[in-house]
């Protein structure tokens, strides 16, 4: 069975999204997040795209490192779900959070601008 080339496109988009967030490149990050994007943080907070990217832009969320492991992709037409483990180091609300492992589950949809993240949830690995 041949691998679906869309899976690698989605992996590339996720890696680009993470890089934009670490670099604080809000323009690039905005293009990779759907307008109705929502994030559920490891502490259970729900953030809209505007809230999330606004916090990154203001330095309230400052990713120092975000290193994903292998990204699993499940495709169903114009929708994809991804899951992977990553190591993150972040300054959140002025508090340094040491490098920690997290599970990430994200949904992507194929829109006019390509694949965009729609929902994202992170869970700390303890």
Image (spheres, grey):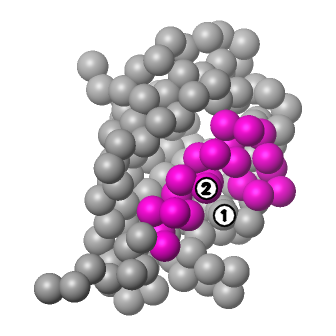
Residue 109, visible in the rendered structure: yes
| Among the 4 quarters of the image, the one containing residue 115 | bottom right
User: Is 12 rendered above or below residue 18?
Assistant: below
Q: Secondary structure at mark 1?
A: helix
Q: Nearer the viewer, mark 2 or mark 1?
A: 2
Q: Position of residue 110 (x, y in %)?
A: 54, 82
User: Is 24 rendered above or below residue 60?
Assistant: below
Q: Is-magenta flag for residue 16? A: yes
* Residue under the point 54% across and 14% down: 97
Residue corresponding to mark 2: 16
Query: What's the magenta bit mostly, secondary-structure-wise?
Result: helix
* Residue under the point 45% across and 62% down: 11
| Among the 4 quarters of the image, the one containing residue 54 | top right
* Residue under the point 40% across and 36% down: 86
Q: Which mark is residue 32?
A: 1
Q: Position of residue 5 (x, y in %)?
A: 39, 81
Left or right of 105? Residue 56 is right
Please give the range of residues in magenta.
9-29
Q: How many residues crowd mark 2 within 10 Å: few (<14), some (14–19), many (20+)? A: some
Left or right of 77? Residue 50 is right
Q: Position of residue 19 (x, y in %)?
A: 64, 45
Left or right of 15? Residue 61 is right
| Towards the viewer: 11 or 81 | 11
């Amino acid at each position: 069975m041949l691998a679906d080339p869309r899976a690698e496109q989605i992996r590339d988009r996720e890696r680009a999204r993470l890089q934009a967030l670490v670099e604080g490149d809000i323009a690039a990050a905005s293009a990779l997040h759907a307008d109705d994007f929502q994030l559920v943080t490891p502490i259970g907070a729900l953030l809209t795209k505007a809230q999330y990217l606004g916090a990154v832009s203001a330095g309230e969320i400052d990713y120092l490192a975000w290193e994903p492991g292998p990204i699993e992709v499940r495709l169903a037409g114009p929708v994809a779900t991804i899951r992977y483990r990553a190591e993150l180091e972040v300054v959140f609300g002025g508090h340094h959070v040491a490098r920690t492992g997290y599970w990430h589950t994200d949904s992507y949809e194929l829109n006019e601008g390509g694949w965009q993240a729609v929902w994202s949830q992170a869970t700390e690995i303890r």
